[in-house]
Amino acid sequence: MFNSIRLRLTLYFSLLIFVILFGTSYLLYQDAYKNQISHIDGSLHVIVNDLNKDIEEDGEEEISDDIEELEDEVQMGRVHVRILGYDLINKTKTTLLKSSTTDESYFAHFDLNKEINQDKIFYKTSKGYRTATQYFAKEKDNVKFIQVAVELSCKENTIGTLVSVNIIIFLFSTIGSYLLISRTLQSVNSVVRCVNQIKSYDYTKRISTQNIPNEIKELIHTFNKLLVRHQSSFDKISQFSSDASHELKTPLTSMRGEIEVGLRRERDKKEYQQILQKSLSKIIEIQKLIDGLLFLAKSDKLEIKSSFEEVYIDEIISECKDELYSLAQSKSIKIKMNLIPLTIKGDSRLLKIACINILKNAILYSPTDTEIKISIEKKNSKFTIIFQDQGVGVSKEDINHIFDRFYRAKKVKARVDGGMGLGLSIVKVILDIHEFDIIVESEVNRGTIVKIFMELSSN
């Protein structure tokens, strides 16, 4: 139930209204009660003084008739009056006279001994009645007091009125808040409907922010950005699937053609060997493609980093040169190295794959009788590995895509040894695992420079 934002906000708003109404009602009640007490005390003061005058003029027995007149004058309802006699020696009190409707319980208890010789009127509230007391005569050891009591009717009336008004306000406020919150959340429902209309294969749609509150706009902008990223990933996956299918289809088609030609008629042993040799080269090409795809799909950065150990980059580069020496010799390409000792934490196998891919690209895409330079430069704790060739280079149009899987520049696609377009993608993944940066600077027909940046930690 309370998982609903609408009900939760309504509950919070209702609790807030309840607290405000309760606090306001308490303050209003206290103010009304104080005003009533003040008004009653003023009327009691007048009654007591008038009765004192009547007693002085007419005597105590004659005041009963004056009480009814006082009730009409002050308009306070029933007025209860009694005259007390107080024995100073025995500390006892006696009711000398009281009005016909008066009960002893209506009057608050006073310590009469403390009020002797006091000219002022004392006020006290007890059992829903307000009592005023004043002494008016003293005879030897006896003192006389007059007491006047009236009922406090405002207390119950005020509380009843406040409770009724608060219930009405609370109910209307709760219903109103629920309707307003429901109306406000209509924009959320609209967004939900738009999201539900987006299909899993179509990320081109975007949620409109027109007539949407600012608080929800930020959520919509975030969701639209997520759609953009999903669209980009979906397009890359689609392109990857298409390219992978194409790359696998080409060697398989070639193998099928060779085998079909070989089966059309009887051939001698040498011809069969040639067919098998061509098929084997295609199988090796497919195997390399599958290995590259598996590496890109399964590379677990955390798992690989957990097995890092100290490796010597200068030795790895030297091993790469030795392994590719025959390929460089076949094109009369010289490889010159200017290396300094460099020890880092990493995976020697992966780093060797990255260096071989970079160096192999430099050899494949360089003309014969050219030169490739490999160097390591140091600046403070930062090291840079530089591969520089004099090859065909990469255009500005293509250089931003050289790390994309299966991407090959137009000139490279036309070459027989153009590769499958996974080499530099694998290099980028390996360097990202090691948290190294790589940049490629190239100029068509002038050559390419590949720089790998790494920084050694102080510890």
Image (tube, rainbow, N blue to C red):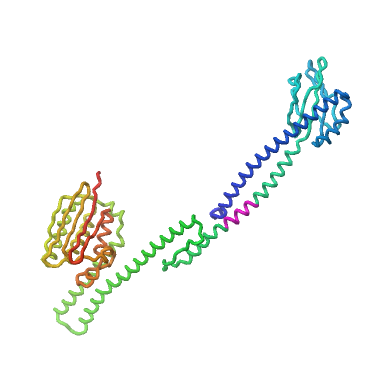
Image coords of residue 188 (percent x, y): 52, 59
Image coords of residue 395 (percent x, y): 24, 66
Q: Nearer the viewer, residue 326 or 218?
A: 218
Residue at 22% from the left image edge and 47% from the top image edge: 381
Question: Does residue 105 show up?
Answer: no
Q: Nearer the viewer, residue 10 or 161?
A: 161
As displayed, is residue 204 above or below residue 301?
below
As displayed, is residue 142 above or below residue 2?
above
Image coords of residue 254 (percent x, y): 23, 76
**313 sits to left or right of 294:** left
Q: Quadrant of the N terminus?
A: bottom right
Q: Residue furthest bottom?
A: 265
Magenta segment's dominant SS is: helix
Residue at 72% from the left image edge and 38% from the top image edge: 155
As displayed, is residue 434 above or below residue 285?
above
Residue at 80% from the left image edge and 27% from the top image edge: 49
Tell me the quarter of the picture where residue 452 sits.
bottom left
Image coords of residue 26 (percent x, y): 65, 40
Q: Nearer the viewer, residue 333 or 379?
A: 379
| Count of marks overlaid on the render | 0
**14 sits to left or right of 431:** right
- Residue 178 drawn in magenta: yes
Question: Does residue 153 show up?
Answer: yes
Instruction: Look at the image and give the residue range highlighted in magenta.
Output: 172-182
Q: Quadrant of the C terminus?
A: top left
- Residue 394 drawn in magenta: no
